[in-house]
Amino acid sequence: MRKPGTPWTLAGGAAAEERLPASLTELLRHRLDRLGASGRALAALAAVVGREFDADLLAELTGTPAAEIDDTLRDLVRRHIFEEAADGKLRFGHDKIREVAYDGLDDEERRRAHRDAARALEQRESTQPSHDLYPVLAHHYSMADEPARAVEFLEKAGQRALEVGGYQDTMDFLRRALTLTERGAAPSTRTRRGRWRRWLGEAAWGLGDIDGCGEHFAAALDDLDRPVPATTGGWLRDAGRRLAGQVARNVLRLPVPTGDGDAAEAALAAARISYHYYHRGENLRMVASTLRAVDLADRADRAARVADSYHQFGYIAGLFRMGKVAAHYFHAAEARARATGDDAALGVSMYGQAIYWYGLGNVGLALRLAGDAVLLMRRIGHTHELEVSQSVLAHVQHSLGRYEEALANSQDVYESARARANGMHESWGAYTIARELIVLDHLDDAIALLSHARELARAAGDRASLVLLGGLRALADTRRGDVEAAAAVDDWLGLVAGSTPSVYSLGHGYAAAAEAALRLFEDAPGDPGARRRARATVAHLWRYAMMFPIGRVPALVHEAWGQRLSGRPRLAERLARAALARARGHTLPYEQAQAERELAALGARG
């Protein structure tokens, strides 16, 4: 070596560095050649098995009793080819040694060795079941040029990864399986591919990728010969046909068509894609997909776990004020979940009903149902749905003025989602923490979290969250006196223009934007732009209240505020009194305080 300057370099420069790997390979090959036939054979077999292995498996692969290969293994350890690992296993002293040993096999020897390793491990799996072996077996069968068996274990590995929340692993395993079948290397059916694509959608959803999950669910429905409509007219016709089917079965009591083997799989895909449309604010597609999911769930085998389809339609019916219809489908969801032992779906139904009752203004019942959902999801260890349940609970707690409890749940969601790289849920946690910090007057921290949440929501394609956190950001900027506050309100108005709110939690964003605009109007009553923003944000808040009655309380409060600033004190007082009565009735302390402030500003007594 020489040191022409800093840092140290090999004499000869880059050319010498390029020769080093080849020289190292030759040195390691020479070390392996000196082992003798039995040592080289064991090293090669071990290289096929993996970096770690046990003596019993090597003995099985060589057809030699373990005791007879002990001397050879000890010699390999002494020569630092192998070294001892945990749990009585062995491993290569360095990955490069394994690489050289593996390269010493010709193509046929490798295939045969991988095939033997796969069969030996599969035999073990039959007597000592282990989910961890699925990806290992898939690898060995793939390298043995047995793609059908590789696909079999990639499917099992993907399903298991999905069950335990290993969403990125699920994506990797199933993409490999699809690649093998699409190339014609392994046989498959449309039903099987549809199931894989639905699992890919579930994994994408688990990772917070709203756009990605929609693509996968749509592809699943296409594979299952139920493609999503391509036009608005197609969506309307599909929704009408499915709605007619529900009327025929639930009102006219006509029999349910049977014999559809793919109905359950398609129902699950349709139910999930409706979530995609829900968060993107595509209401026609959301409603039509939910109707399709219910129709398919009716046709599915009674043992199929399709409860989600029913609770989603219950929620949709609730949006349209069809209380009895909503109750019917919520009951159907619970009954199906209990009958099929689907605890996760039961918990989802609980928080779905909590959302429904919260929207109607029954905050106490919503609190109980959301709390029950949290307890159930925590008991069964379903991290993803636990985060959703805690988010619902935090929304209800915030409305009840239980800000510290809401903050604790939001922090749990944020930390859990961050740990498992779910950007959408991390965004939820970040902006709901910020929501509590705004109330507690920690504005700088709230604004930092809202900026972080916005980037996450944009990456996830979560339009609903952008609306909610956009309103919160406008309020935080206004309270802090930032010059960008008016621009933040304008940005929010651009987000909600032409849309109909269908997500219950948006109320906090709508109310926050209206409060921000009214504060700006109060500070500059002669500014036409401030007046326009105030009127527009309050009008949007009333649109939210038309969908969710709980929104009437903040709508009345902010309407009263706007009327006072516009010089209509009598109307403002009537509105403020109505808001105060409703706020007390629904136990909404923040809105109650706002209504009392308005009455005080008007010189009236509450």
Image: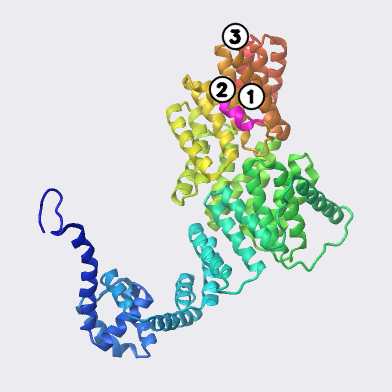
How would you classify the magenta stretch by its main secondary structure?
helix
Local packing at callout 3 (Cα closer than 10 Å; few below 14, some 14-19, many 20+) is few
Q: Is residue 31 above or below residue 38?
A: above
The image quadrant that residue 586 belongs to is top right
Q: Nearer the viewer, mark 3 or mark 2?
A: 3
Can you identify the residue that label 2 sits on? 516
The verdict on residue 178 being magenta is no
Q: Which mark is residue 537?
A: 1
Of the pair 306 and 169, the residue shown nearer to us: 169
Residue behind mark 3: 526
Give the percent coordinates (x, y) of residue 441.
47, 26
Q: Which stretch appears magenta?
A: 489-497
Distance from the alpha carbon under mark 1 to that under mark 2: 9 Å
Hey, what amino acid is under mark 1?
Thr
The image quadrant of residue 555 is top right
In front of the other: 59 or 190: 190
Q: Amino acid at mark 2?
A: Ala
In space, the residues marked 3 and 2 are separated at their CA atoms by 17 Å
Amino acid bearing label 3: Gly
